[in-house]
Amino acid sequence: MASLSIENLTKRFGTSLAVDRLDLSVQEGELVALLGPSGCGKTTTLRMVAGFLPPTSGRVLFDRDDVTNLPAHRRSTGMVFQSYALFPHMTAAQNVGFGLEMRGLGAAERQARVEEALKLVRLAHLAGRFPRELSGGQQQRVALARALVINPKLFLLDEPLSNLDAKLRAEVRIEIRALQQRLGLTTLLVTHDREEALTMADRLVVMEGGRVRQVGSPRELYDEPRDAFVADFVGRCNILSGRRENETEFRTESGLVLPVDTTPNESNNANVFALRPERISVEPGAKGSLHGAVQAVTYLGSQTEYHVCIGKEVFVVIQQTPGANEPLAAVKPQDQVSLRWDCKAPRLVPHTSL
Ligand code: ATP
């Protein structure tokens, strides 16, 4: 496996800038996810790393080797796509072995490596099946085996789970992560699914408009977003515009005064209050200054979501679902409730850090 360095990488399509001076390094054995809304430049970046697309400027290095001008087939990357891109007329084993045949490996070695790769993805028993005889999850595992079998320097995953249903997605996610960690695969994952990125990646790169907004561990990005865009993109968040009144208060544009502790928030242009829904607690009755009417109660099984209207603002609160005999179980729309949070929980951030 190699490490990956992306230096000042830029891609223009005509006048539009798809990727704008991107810098990123991925350590050997690390999984880094590119996360961002549609059109932010994730796939374009991945395609430049794979060698399918020439950059307008900048460099791509595997270890210390500059591969910017190397064609895709000489880069030794293992790619897995959203559409599994399996050959329909070939069995699982033939699909996995195709790349080895192209590389001129003899039949005996090919067979041994195909068997090993299929074993890794727990599909050895289905080696003789055609893609149409396999489920979506199994087809995606064949695609994984096909990418792994060539012993790639870099593992590139482009929305690999988006064709699977939610339950299967969660399963295959864990499988890929376990395999990636066990084999120490240097991996670049492209996704617009924040849950996928948070659960799979060592580090996340949040992109927007071709540029990097923030790079960090899932926990850093979730707990310490640099700006409102990142806060909102990596998880549910109550985001309210306004200004810092003093060290302990934030005043929203609608005039609501919210308790904060501004000491961890050094930014001068922090005009957004950002607070995760699970950091707020709801109590029945109108106590304290932050109370209002419940607008909606949504039962989500282990969690319950409350929308609470205070002045002109609506707060989203997510709490563990109380037991049948606990007081909150009785909270219903129109009830008066109070909200509380630890004043260290909110982040004061700028709208944008760009
Ligand atoms: P998605 O999640 O929808 O796949 P993405 O973040 O991967 O989005 P890209 O596919 O990298 O985004 O596209 C980035 C920008 O570049 C978009 O504005 C897109 O329209 C543009 N773009 C991509 N490929 C081309 C192309 N071949 N010609 C012109 N513009 C392109």
Image: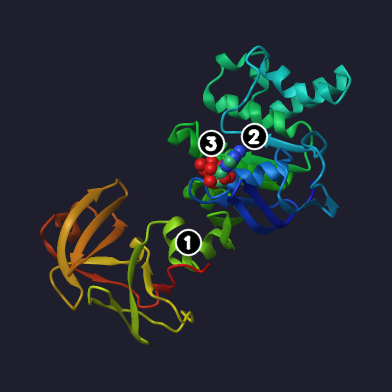
Label located before the other in sequence (2 or 1): 2
Element at label 2:
strand
Label 1 environment density (alpha carbons within 10 Å; few <14, some 14–19, many ≥20): many
Q: Residue 122: horizontal and vertical position, in percent?
A: 64, 28
Q: State which quadrant residue 107 falls in.
A: top right
Q: Is mark 2 within 8 Å of ligand 1?
A: no
Question: Quick one: 77 or 299, which is closer to the camera?
Answer: 77
Instruction: Tell me which numbered mark, 2 or 3, is placed earlier along the sequence.
Output: 2
Name the amino acid type tagged 3. Leu
Label 3: how many Cα within 10 Å (few below 14, some 14–19, many 20+): many
Circles 3 and 1, Cβ within 8 Å, touching? The answer is no
Separation (CA) of disc 2 from disc 3: 10 Å
**Numbered disc 1: secondary structure:** helix
Q: Residues within 10 Å of mark 2 (few under 14, many from 20)?
A: many
x and y percentages locating residue 251 in the rendered image: 29, 79
Q: Mark 1 points at which residue?
A: 230
Which residue is disc 2 drawn over?
80
Residue in view at x 56 percent, y 18 percent: 134
Q: Give the spatial CA distance, label 2 vs label 1.
A: 27 Å
Q: Nearer the viewer, mark 3 or mark 1?
A: 1
Residue on which the image places disc 3: 161
Say left or right for 167 vs 58. Answer: left
Total marks shown come to 3
Q: Position of residue 223 (x, y in %)?
A: 47, 66
| x 65%, y 28%: residue | 143
Q: Which colour scheme is used?
A: rainbow
As drawn, which residue projects farthest toward the left? 334
Quadrant field for ligand 1: top right
Position of 290 relative to 294 (above/below): below
| Amino acid type for the residue under numbered disc 2 | Val
